[in-house]
Amino acid sequence: MEDGQLSFDNLSIIVTAIIIGTLARIWLLKEDYRQYPSYPNGYLIHVVTGFVAAALGAVAIPALISKNFVAVTFLTLALQQFRDVRKMEKESLNDLEETEYTYRGTAYVDGIAKTFEARNYIAFITALSVSLTITVMPFSFWIDIAIGILVGMLILLFLKNFTKGKRIGDIAQVEAGKIEVKDSSLFVDGIFVSNLLGTDNASKLVQDEGLAVVISPNEDHYRINLDNFGQRQAALFEATRALGNKRYHFTRKDYEKGRVVIALVPIKQDIDALIEVVKKCPLLESAKKSHRVMKTNWRGE
Amino acid sequence: MGRESTMQPNYTILAYVTMKKGRILTSSCLTLLAESKNTAKQMTVDIAKALKADVVQLTNGDYMIIRI
């Protein structure tokens, strides 16, 4: 940085780091389609915020090297920006709560918002590591760039696996449940679920078109997670979202064996899809209490 | 969807349909007396449809129309 002009080397470092950081955000964004409300606009918003996050990470090292220590204080801006991303996401999802088939629930909304915030940190850290690596490498310019990109990708892979959460299918068995309507009460595999079926129409509809799954924890202490109201609400939300909801949706826990029932009258009659979507429902961070479940799987399996 | 006892109850009783006058003591909701079982059922369905609500049939035969 001579005479206030950015040197070619610095420019290359910054541009490379921004590209890798932004690509990191785009890569992580692809996994969000299940949770994301509006694809094109949502994609654009998050790619742009990811780009800003990557830019902040990319310029930090060149700024330090040019002894521009004041410029480094803009990192606080990064933190503020990421917090705003979380806030924006939370507000957006909360605004949609009334229009969905069922509520996501505050625990699920909080988890999604945190994930979006964390993904901006990933873009930031990836860009920062690319920038740092290229700067400290002693080889020729293009080799340094190549190593920087490689290191960035490794860091990204590590962070992706580090932040990857577990799913209901990892701690429990999810199987189809047998629906029975006795008088005006709904039972699934013998577990009482609801007595809201007070009319003949309701009984007939649930009996003919209702689908249900029973979640059985693999170990007794996993009940702590599965019994969590927010967790069950999240599973129900994913079920209604995937299959639609013609009428009625219930969750109920069985105190005796710790089983959890999810029952609904879906638009799309596909029990396999229902099982799959419940299995893939993320375990909420706020519901995690067991150390075993909290343990991060570094390989991301 | 049923909520846990520890959670804030999120339901409203909109109407109660009974066939026994003695069961109507006091109520903040609409309480109706039906002449027969069929009338009670029909009234319940009509009200539930109009209010887009759910129906619970109590074991004593009365109906409660609630919204969750």
Image (cartoon, helix red, strand yellow):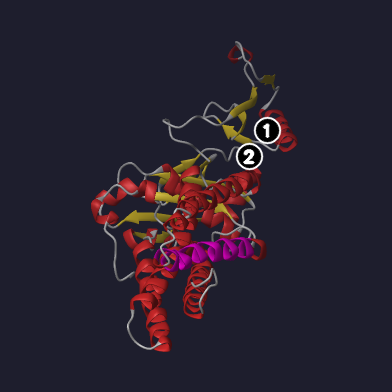
Labels 2 and 1 positioned on one and the same chain: no
Task: Confirm whether the magenta stretch covers residue A171.
Answer: no
The foreground one among A43 and A174 is: A43
Range drawn in magenta: A42-64
| Chief secondary structure of the magenta portion | helix
Where residue A138 sits, quadrant-wise, is bottom left
The foreground one among A121 and A75 is: A75
Q: Taking the image as drawn, is residue A94 in sight? A: yes
The image shows residue A215 at horizontal and vertical percentages of 38, 55
Q: Quadrant of the C terminus of chain A?
A: bottom left
The image shows residue A170 at horizontal and vertical percentages of 34, 62
A292 left or right of A164?
Answer: left
Q: Image height check: is A47 above or below A80?
A: below
Determine the chain carrying the residue at label 2.
Answer: A
Residue at disc 2, secondary structure: loop
Residue at disc 1, secondary structure: helix
Looking at numbered disc 2 in the image, what kind of residue is underneath it?
Thr
Residue drawn where x is 54% and y is 26% of the image: B60
> How many other residues sit within 10 Å of disc 1, few (<14), some (14-19) or many (≥20)?
many
A132 left or right of A12?
Answer: left
Determine the chain carrying the residue at label 1.
Answer: B
The image shows residue B54 at horizontal and vertical percentages of 62, 37
The foreground one among A3 and A251 is: A3
Q: Image height check: is A282 above or below A298?
A: above
CB under 8 Å between callouts 2 and 1? yes
The foreground one among A147 and A207 is: A147
Q: Taking the image as drawn, is residue A187 in sight? A: no
The image shows residue A25 at horizontal and vertical percentages of 50, 68
Task: Confirm whether the magenta stretch covers residue A54.
Answer: yes
> How many other residues sit within 10 Å of disc 2, few (<14), some (14-19) or many (≥20)?
many
Could you say which disc has been placed on residue A199 in the image? 2
Task: Give the labeled residue for mark 1.
Answer: B41
